[in-house]
Amino acid sequence: MTGLRSLSVLGATGSVGASTLDLVRREPEAWRLVALTAHSNATELARLALEFSAEIAVVADEARLPELREALAGTGIATAGGPAALVEAAARGADVTVAAIVGCAGLAPTMAAIEQGGVIALANKEALVSAGEVMTAAVARHGATLLPVDSEHNAIFQCLQGNNTAHVRWITLTASGGPFRDWSWEQLSAATPAQAIKHPNWDMGAKISVDSATMFNKGLELIEAHHLFPVGLDRLRIIVHPQSIVHSMVEYRDGSTLAQLGPSDMRVPIASALAYPERMDTPCAPLDLAAIGELTFRTPDEDRFPATRLAREAAQAGGAIPAVLNAANEVAVAAFLAGQISFTRIAAQVEDVLNAYMPVAPACLSDVLAVDGEARERARQLMEAA
């Protein structure tokens, strides 16, 4: 890459944030750090802010602000805490903003970054799943550039470059199938949280690992793809690819299929977004296809894993329904991780909420957050009544 670029990392202490900063660390002369944020890990946030000479460090948990202030006293690095401070940090603007705050807590900061224009490297699923129509309208209104960081969406983005989307026959999202892809329904019914978070290919947090095990992660990605690549839901499909080497594919009307291959390392798609429209070095080992030996594919089983069906139906319904699906899933996953419901009850509980709550389409971000809150409350009520 050429030239100095400014960068903010929203969610700097999470896995995506850590991978982003690992890449920045390798080309420090190329970047000026504006804002780094974290949820509650003030110690690590302060260390990163010092290492990268950030302009401001923000901790979402305001109770950790004194710790952050003490760690950065006398450094010249500004500090702040609380949800409003996250939004203000994102609104400072940067050439590139990595939006990697997990959950709906990331919606308002992501919107604030969009409103400043620039490049948004999006790793927050909720931005497009819960607020897709609101967010994409804001991107167009403010002239921002939205670049996907999820490996699957980044792969599709790369495969579409230089091509006309009118010529697309299929966009295929690949799924590893998670740790339970070969389990029977009886085995799934007895699955434990410890088993669910052991992803065979990726090192991820507990929530996203459970989503991979249920296939909700792929369902949410289908909704994201629907907003990022508006070719129509009828041209979006999912295929299970256990090796996680082919990250997604695009088939064109002439029969050509373009696929993006790479190691199971998030630094590859993050580097693609950071350097766009150029390329940058990563420390990732090149693929050795001979050593891998074979790449296999299979059709998803929506009887054992109904999450992808529910997500497609939510995307077809549009409006507020994807936000309801996302909120209900988050409540169900938390309940499963706490040992309150079984693994197979996750999708069933989400479907119960979808059948019980059908709000009107949100017109703005506050509407999205209101739907999210109500859906979570209804999910908890249904779980208590069960």
Image: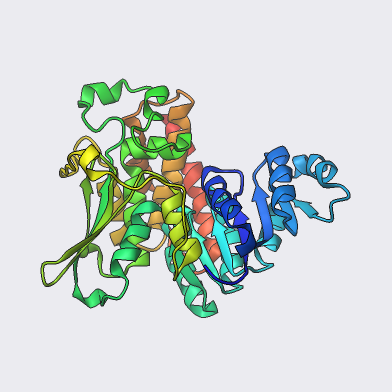
Q: Quadrant of residue 175?
A: top left
Q: Position of residue 144 (x, y in %)?
A: 52, 74
Vertical placement of residue 288 versus 277, above or below: above
* The furthest residue to the right: 74
* The furthest residue to the left: 255
Vertical placement of residue 260 versus 60, above or below: below
Is 74 on the left-hand or right-hand side of 275? right
Of the pair 178 and 383, the residue shown nearer to us: 178
Vertical placement of residue 76 versus 93, above or below: above
Residue 249 seen anywhere in this rendered image of the structure: yes
Is 284 on the left-hand or right-hand side of 245? right
Residue at image position (30%, 76%) is: 162
Residue at image position (25%, 63%) is: 233
Of the pair 55 and 217, the residue shown nearer to us: 55
Q: Which of the image's four quarters has the C terminus?
A: top left
Residue at image position (63%, 57%) is: 28
Residue at image position (35%, 45%) is: 263
Of the pair 137 and 229, the residue shown nearer to us: 229
Vertical placement of residue 205 versus 103, above or below: above
Q: Position of residue 78 (x, y in %)?
A: 80, 56
Q: Position of residue 350 (x, y in %)?
A: 36, 41
Residue 131 seen anywhere in this rendered image of the structure: no
Is 47 on the left-hand or right-hand side of 297? right
Of the pair 259 and 88, the residue shown nearer to us: 259
